[in-house]
Amino acid sequence: MPTRAPRARAGVAHNKILAKLASGLHKPAQQTVVPLAAVRALLAPLPIGRLRQLGGKFGEQLMAGLGIATVGAGDAARAPRHAPRPRAPPLRRAARRQLRAAARAAARTARS
């Protein structure tokens, strides 16, 4: 039976997000090092969804709210200064409502 050498890829960068992104750039078995000077050039053409934690529904809301599609400096420069924030998840909104109701009830009993 023929033996196969294991393959591995790795990304080395200044933080976890960049290292994870770098490890996926040159598949299947290459290593990628991202020096600090190359970060802007690496990120500029990337779609927002390629970044960890910015994919899926949140990434779509971010792109729609800010009107940007890539991480690049050109898109960020065109973004509005006070962009709308994505809405909080339903559980967080419910918790806020409960806290506000409890605070109002406590204020009413304190006044009585």
Image: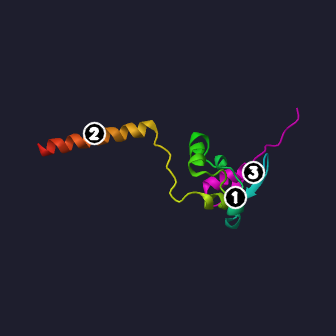
Q: What mark, if any, has residue 101 been given in the picture?
A: 2
Q: Number of callouts in the render?
A: 3
User: Who's the residue at 32% across and 38% down the image?
Assistant: 98
Label 1 environment density (alpha carbons within 10 Å; few <14, some 14–19, many ≥20): some
Q: Residue 97: which quarter of the image? A: top left
The residues colored magenta run 1-24
State left or right for residue 74 relative to residue 62: right
Q: Residue furthest left?
A: 112
The image position of residue 73, as x and y in percent, is 65, 61
Other-residue count near label 3 (Cα within 10 Å), few / some / many at <14 / 14–19 / ≥20? some
* Residue 109 rendering spot, x and y as whole percentages: 15, 41
- Mark nearer the viewer, 2 or 3: 2
Q: Is residue 27 left or right of residue 52?
A: right
Q: Does 92 appear above or below 80?
A: above
Q: Based on the picture, tell me whether residue 111 belongs to the magenta stretch.
A: no
Q: Mark 1 against mark 3, which lies toward the viewer?
A: 1
Question: Considering the numbered disc 3 on the image, is that residue within a helix, a strand or a loop?
Answer: loop
Determine which quarter of the picture holds residue 102: top left
Q: CA distance from mark 2 to mark 1?
A: 45 Å
Q: Earlier in the sequence, mark 1 or mark 3?
A: 3
- Residue 41 can be seen in this image: yes
The reply to whether the C-beta atoms of the residues labelled 2 and 1 are less than 8 Å apart is: no
Q: Could you tell me residue 59's position as x and y percent?
A: 59, 45
Quickly name the residue at label 3.
25
Which quarter of the picture shows residue 79?
Answer: bottom right
User: Counting other residues with Cα less than 10 Å from the Cα at mark 2, is it few (<14), some (14-19), or many (20 or more)?
Assistant: few
Lower position in the chain sequence, tag 2 or tag 3 = 3
**Circle 2: element type:** helix
Q: Is residue 53 visible?
A: no
On residue 44, which mark appears?
1
